[in-house]
């Protein structure tokens, strides 16, 4: 059995069935994800971009000259370009992503746009330690940039681990610049994950299509529904796929019974309070040195250093 099948079988064998969010991202999934970020209801992207544009000079001052900017995720988003446009004399820009094609394509775009910048893409799973490239100019410090509230897609313990890995990667004198979504009116959050055009639903359901096509599963995709509920107490959106009938699903050689109304958990999206994240950072051995928000306090960008 391949590792992927093993992992899928394991997740579907839990009392609460789950599938790792990494199976969202085939080509169609990546395309749909782009579309999500452009939805009027999806406030996260606009709010984060607004923060970057308004406070980029201050961020550049904290990051300083001749730093190496290590982005977790393939980069090329508008907010990354805003940052790169204001960091002069960067020693290197190091986008890190698990998908080589996507990574190299966006690295090329960045090179075209910033011809003087040393761009060193690294194909790696950023949840584990990886070797950093050695740029021609020795960096004064490493700053890990993790935008898009992606840290919020990890559960507490994993998010803590990841923050430690990031700081380890940045090394002595390094810093983290993290984009995080904030707790707010639950209706606003609900609408962001239940958009009127149904793009988020399509994105969620596409995971099953992807597993059928590329992993030999046989989910009856049309008999599933997208569900995204904000759990205010836990401060997180729970993304699920809910079976609308009883069905037997085969993955690898393993059969799974799904009851009518039974859900598969596909992802969490945690929302933070400023105090809550400060505590979390502290528990991970970090200190929030500076935090920026948009005027409506929808989103935050946090600059953390070792405590
Ligand atoms: N991290 C962002 C968020 O939680 C983007 C994202 C990741 C997302 N997975 C998603 C958005 C699934 C919608 C659905 O919002």
Image: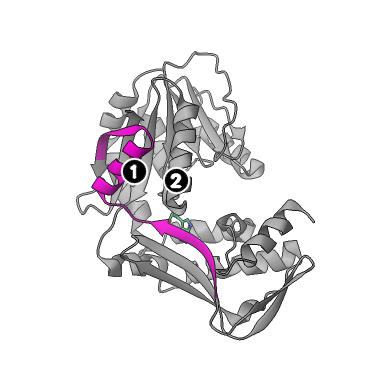
Secondary structure under badge 1? Answer: helix
Viewer-proximal residue among 231 and 13: 13
Could one spot residue 69 in this view of the protein? no
Inspect the magenta stretch and tell me whether residue 288 lies in it.
yes
Q: Position of residue 271 (x, y in %)?
A: 34, 55
Which mark, by number, is residue 280? 1
Q: Position of residue 168 (x, y in %)?
A: 48, 28
Give me the C-alpha separation between circle 2 and circle 1. 9 Å
* Depicted 137 relative to depicted 162: above or below: above
Residue placed at 40% from the left, 24% from the top?
174
Q: Are marks 2 and 1 in contact (CB under 8 Å)?
A: yes
| Mark toward the start of the polypeptide (2 vs 1) | 2
For residue 100, side relative to residue 296 (left or right): right
Q: Quadrant of residue 285?
A: top left
Quarter of the image for the N terminus: give it.
bottom right
**Image quadrant of ligand 1?**
bottom left
Could you classify mark 1 by the number of other residues whose Cα lies within 10 Å: few (under 14), some (14-19), or many (20 or more)? some
């Amino acid at each position: 059995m391949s590792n992927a099948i093993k992992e899928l079988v394991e997740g579907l064998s839990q009392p609460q069935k789950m599938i790792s969010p990494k199976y969202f991202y085939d080509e169609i999934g990546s395309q749909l994800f782009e579309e999500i970020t452009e939805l009027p209801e999806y406030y996260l992207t606009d709010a984060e971009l607004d923060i970057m544009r308004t406070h980029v000079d201050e961020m550049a001052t904290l990051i300083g000259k001749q730093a190496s900017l290590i982005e977790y995720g393939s980069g090329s988003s508008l907010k990354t370009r805003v940052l790169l446009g204001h960091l002069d004399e960067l020693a290197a820009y190091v986008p890190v992503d698990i998908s080589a094609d996507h990574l190299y394509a966006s690295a090329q775009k960045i090179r075209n746009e910033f011809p003087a910048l040393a761009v060193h893409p690294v194909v790696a799973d950023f949840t584990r330690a990886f070797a950093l490239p050695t740029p021609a100019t020795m960096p004064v410090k490493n700053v890990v940039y993790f935008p898009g509230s992606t840290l919020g897609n990890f559960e507490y313990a994993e998010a803590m681990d990841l923050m430690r890995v990031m700081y380890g990667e940045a090394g002595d004198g390094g810093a983290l610049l993290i984009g995080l979504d904030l707790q707010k009116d639950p209706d606003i959050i609900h609408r962001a994950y239940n958009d009127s055009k149904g793009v988020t639903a399509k994105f969620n359901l596409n995971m099953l299509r992807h597993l059928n096509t590329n992993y030999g599963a046989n989910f009856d995709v049309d008999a599933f529904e997208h569900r995204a509920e904000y759990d205010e107490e836990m401060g997180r959106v729970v993304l699920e796929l809910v079976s609308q009938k009883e069905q037997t699903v085969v993955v690898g050689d393993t059969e799974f019974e799904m009851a009518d109304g039974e859900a598969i958990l596909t992802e969490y999206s945690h929302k933070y309070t400023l105090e809550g994240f400060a505590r979390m950072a502290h528990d991970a051995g970090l200190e929030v040195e500076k935090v920026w928000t948009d005027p409506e306090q929808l989103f935050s960008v946090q600059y953390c250093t070792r405590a």
